[in-house]
Amino acid sequence: MSLLSQINTERLPHHIAIIMDGNGRWAKNKGLLRNIGHKNGAKTVKEVVETCAKIDIKYLTLYAFSNENWNRPKLEVELLMKLLISSLKKEVKTLQKNNIKLTTIGNINSLPTKVANELKDVVTKTKDNKRLTLTLALSYGSREELIKTVKEISLKVKNNLISPENIDKSVINNHLYNQNLPDVDLLIRTSGEQRISNFLLWEIAYAELFFTRTLWPDFNKENLFEAILNYQNRERRFGKTSEQLK
Ligand code: FPP
């Protein structure tokens, strides 16, 4: 029986986030340049995005470039930026055809102007699409995001626009990069590493974590279905007891 047919469509994760890891190792294992790993990683991005739209996942967030990734060799960063531009140019039609809205989180203005402009263009073109919201985390770090949030709220407190006792979860949400991003239900990390690496620390409070040894360029829709099935076999208690859930 195919994995897809085993998925309960009533209990799909609303928001899937993915730490796409292992492009470099995939290339090294094959005696290829790291850049070829990233190019093949971009093919996986396409397959995963199209599959999520097809099976009706509402939010997909991909960790495409972290704040720490700026420390990689200059040439690798340049090639990643070029790959981002070419992927955006190539895939804008696919996003439109599949009714996918592109959004971003991260310090977008720190990206090269060409990348930032291309992103803004695709975000504008797809803003009314409704089937799936695809969010790319770029020049992103969750702690930096939380620092930004604390600074903005502190300023509002200082100017008497908000009182400290009224600061709650929704106030924090309203100061994140994207105020409409819901909590993550399922977080996937490829390549065998089992860590969070400064990704969506606020939104993953109750996420189910799925780690696979598959390297990102080898990850395919069957691996995605496997992760979703694994998620559907878990009991999400949100602090309650099993009995309370029955
Ligand atoms: C991690 O693999 C991957 C990245 C840092 C970049 C992710 C980029 C892509 C998947 C390609 C393009 C993206 C889009 C959105 C079109 P790694 O280089 O850290 O692998 P390693 O740990 O094996 O070295």
Image (cartoon, rainbow, N blue to C red):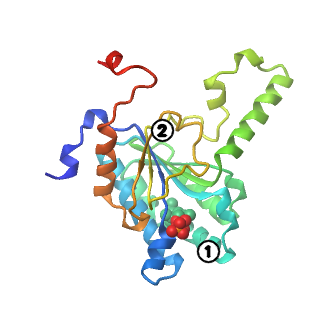
- The x and y percentages for residue 192 are 44, 59
Quadrant assignment, res 29: bottom left
Q: Residue at 64%, 41% (x, y): give it.
A: 177
Q: Residues at badges 2 and 1 in contact (C-beta under 8 Å)?
A: no
Q: For mark 1, what is the residue?
A: 76
- How packed is label 2: few (under 14 Cα within 10 Å), some, or many (20 or more)? many
Q: For the residue with label 2, is its CB less than 8 Å from the closest atom of ligand 1? A: no
Q: Residue at x 52, y 51 (%)?
A: 125
Residue 3 in sight here = yes
Give whichever of 148, 97 is nearer the camera.
Answer: 148
Question: Left or right: where does residue 53 sit relative to residue 17?
Answer: left
**Three-letter code, disc 1:** Glu
User: At numbered mark 1, what does the secondary structure look like: helix, strand or loop?
Assistant: helix
Cβ of mark 1 under 8 Å from ligand 1: the answer is: yes
The CA span between labels 2 and 1 is 30 Å
In terms of image quadrants, where is residue 59?
A: top left
Categorize mark 1 by other alpha carbons within 10 Å: few (<14), some (14-19), many (20+).
Answer: some
Residue 98 image position (x, y, % from top left) = 36, 51
Q: Answer with mark 2 or mark 1, whichever residue precedes in sequence.
A: 1
Q: Position of residue 181 (x, y in %)?
A: 53, 37
Residue in the foreground of this view, choosing between 9 and 189: 189
Q: Which residue is mark 2?
A: 184
Question: Residue flagged by tag 2: what amino acid is it?
Answer: Val
